[in-house]
Image (cartoon, rainbow, N blue to C red):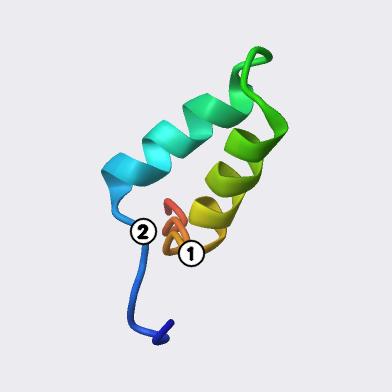
Amino acid sequence: MAKTEHTSKTVAAKASKILKDPKSSKAMKSIAASALTQAPDRKKRK
């Protein structure tokens, strides 16, 4: 994967919900975590 490719905000939000859901399978959580590691960092508020 190129360095310029990132997970979209929509996909990152859905991945976060999957990780928080206790009913999600290990495979789903693994994929969600992978997507979040590719998401751009959030900017700090001043």
Residue 35: horizontal and vertical position, in percent? 49, 54
How packed mark 2 is, by other alpha carbons closer than 10 Å (few <14, some 14-19, many 20 or more), is some
Residue 19: numbered disc: none
In percent of the image, x 29 and y 54: which residue is there? Answer: 8
* Residue pointed to by mark 1: 38
Q: Left or right: 10 with respect to 21?
A: left
Quarter of the figure that contains the N terminus: bottom left
* Residue that extends furthest to the bottom in the rendered view of this protein: 2
Tell which of 1 and 8 is nearer to you: 1
Label 2 amino acid? Thr
Q: Secondary structure at mark 1?
A: loop
**4 shown above or below 25:** below
**38 shown above or below 46:** below
* Residue pointed to by mark 2: 7
Quarter of the figure that contains the C terminus: bottom left
* Residue that extends furthest to the top in the rendered view of this protein: 23
Q: Left or right: 28 with respect to 40?
A: right
**3 shown above or below 30:** below
In percent of the image, x 42 and y 51: which residue is there? Answer: 45
Label 1 amino acid? Gln
Q: Secondary structure at mark 2?
A: loop
Residue 43: horizontal and vertical position, in percent? 42, 59
Tell which of 43 and 14 is nearer to you: 14
In percent of the image, x 58 and y 35: which residue is there? Answer: 28
Residue 32: quarter of image:
top right
Q: Left or right: 20 with respect to 4?
A: right
Residue 39: quarter of image:
bottom left
CA distance separating discs 2 and 1: 6 Å
Of callouts 2 and 1, the N-terminal one: 2
Residue 24: horizontal and vertical position, in percent? 62, 21
Residue 9: horizontal and vertical position, in percent? 30, 47
Asked if labels 1 and 2 touch by Cβ distance under 8 angstroms, the answer is yes
